[in-house]
Amino acid sequence: MAWVLKMDEVIESGLVHDFDASLSGIGQELGAGAYSMSDVLALPIFKQEDSSLPLDDETKHPPFQYVMCAATSPAVKLHDETLTYLNQGQSYEIRMLDNRKMGDMPEITGKLVKSIIRVVFHDRRLQYTEHQQLEGWKWNRPGDRLLDLDIPMSVGIIDTRTNPSQLNAVEFLWDPAKRTSAFIQVHCISTEFTPRKHGGEKGVPFRIQVDTFKQNENGEYTDHLHSASCQIKVFKPKGADRKQKTDREKMEKRTAHEKEKYQPSYDTTILTECSPWPDTPTAYVNNSSSTAPTFTSPQQSTCSVPDSNSSSPNHQGDGVSQASSEQLQPSATTQETQQWLLKNRFSSYTRLFSNFSGADLLKLTKEDLVQICGAADGIRLYNSLKSRSVRPRLTLYVCQEQPSSTLLQGQQQAAGSGGENGSGTPYVYHAIYLEEMVASEVARKLALVFNIPFHQINQVYRQGPTGIHILVSDQMVQNFQDESCFLFSTVKVENSGGIHIILK
């Protein structure tokens, strides 16, 4: 029995000694002097047991990382993109970090890369009309830029460039192996692109996007390497600080359960990977002689604008040719489509639809055009594509008497019923459409339809009871019945060379 107790003591002392040794080993491995996160992650407990999962070397590793030194909003829900508030005109640092692993992209080692920083619209509808929106901002703020670089505060950037035609972009060269920080200033505020109503409008969000390129074989920085962006809102000076404080106070009032649905506020904003901006890049960093793109205005276009005083489509003269030329045909080429847009006062969208043929443009629905161009221009473009003319306020049918014809009561009755004249020839009437409902418009449309020199028409009369001549006034035209029929004759005015028109 004593032998058994002694053996138990020996076994127990051996286990204690082994346990103490194992503890001391862990202390040595994870001591302060030897601590390494990579060593910890290499321990078997942290390794994936499933070999089918991708290893670290197989996962995508971005070559660069951009960090903006501005706090994110605490009022953003989980799984939503972060939102950062900026003050107008204040300098904010964007740190340009080399995130490559050993041996990644050796072709740029020891070489410069080019980065383009942009402030662009977050909303897709405003992205479609970016050129129009920026032109409007430029008109209201002549000489200003949407985005600037604070060069004195920036570190490690060289050969900074700004294009006068791109007020929302700056570009520069930098060495990934050296510390680089670009300080940016955003001069537009979010409410400048919000329709004015009654004050207190909610500003539109912007995006800060960074696109980075390396040199190609020709020495131009056009080979895309990496792009990342973040969502921002820009306020008037100190407005971002007040908004951040308001969001923080709102979150403090929420319950602990509600706070779990929101992201915490971070001191910096990490730009997340995205697709490169569509119109990148230009090679003007190495070619200062290149010029900014130009846009043709409707006044400079060689296309002739149809006369707004054109007559009815039923008229077989100029009215028909003008009506047919206004309509965009499905067979129209991209160049013809551009000319049609300029001709119909859609010059702001020529760049947006630069690759659209007539068939491409006609396939767009009304909802598509409203989303792309906004409500006002979208509906106007849709109506123009569908050749929807304005409905006239008054339609008159008129026929010119032949000089040899004698005005008889029977002929007047026949004219009212669309009959024939005394020689058996049917009366041919033309429709004129009035939009303004004034006497001068009646004279102008008659002159246009029947090829009468407008400057020769002195007065327009209407034949009344017992053959009296009543001067046609604006009030009389407004009281004409729609689709009234008239015969009219011309009477020369003595000693003036002009004529009077008499409606019968």
Image: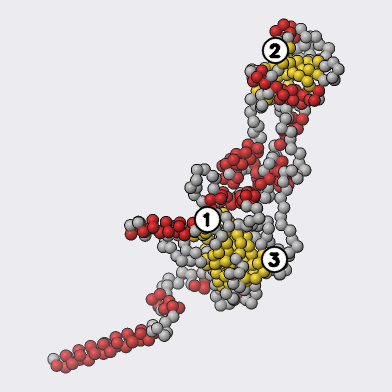
Establish if 427 lies above or below 334.
above
- Type of amino acid at the residue the image marks with label 1: Lys
User: In the figure, 15 relative to 340: above or below?
Assistant: below
Tag 2: amino acid: Gly
Disc 1 on helix, strand or loop? loop
Q: Nearer the viewer, mark 1 or mark 2?
A: 1
Residue 59: which disc? none
Res 392 seen here: yes
Mark 1 and mark 2 in contact? Answer it, CB < 8 Å.
no
Q: Which mark is residue 285?
A: 3
Q: Mark 2 highlights which residue?
A: 416
Q: Which residue is mark 1?
A: 236
Residue at position x 70%, y 10% from top?
464
Q: Is residue 231 visible?
A: no
- Name the residue rendered at 68%, 45% in the picture: 347
| Quarter of image, res 390 | top right
How far separated are the C-alphas under marks 1 and 2?
70 Å
Q: CA distance from mark 3 to mark 2?
A: 76 Å
**x%, y% of residue 121?**
56, 54
Residue 166 falls left or right of residue 238: right
Q: Is residue 105 left or right of residue 325?
A: left
In this view, the residue in front, 87 or 36, is 87
Please state the horizontal and vertical placement of residue 141, each as a whole percent of the image: 62, 52
Q: Amino acid at mark 3?
A: Val
- Look at the numbered disc 2 and give the secondary structure of its residue: helix
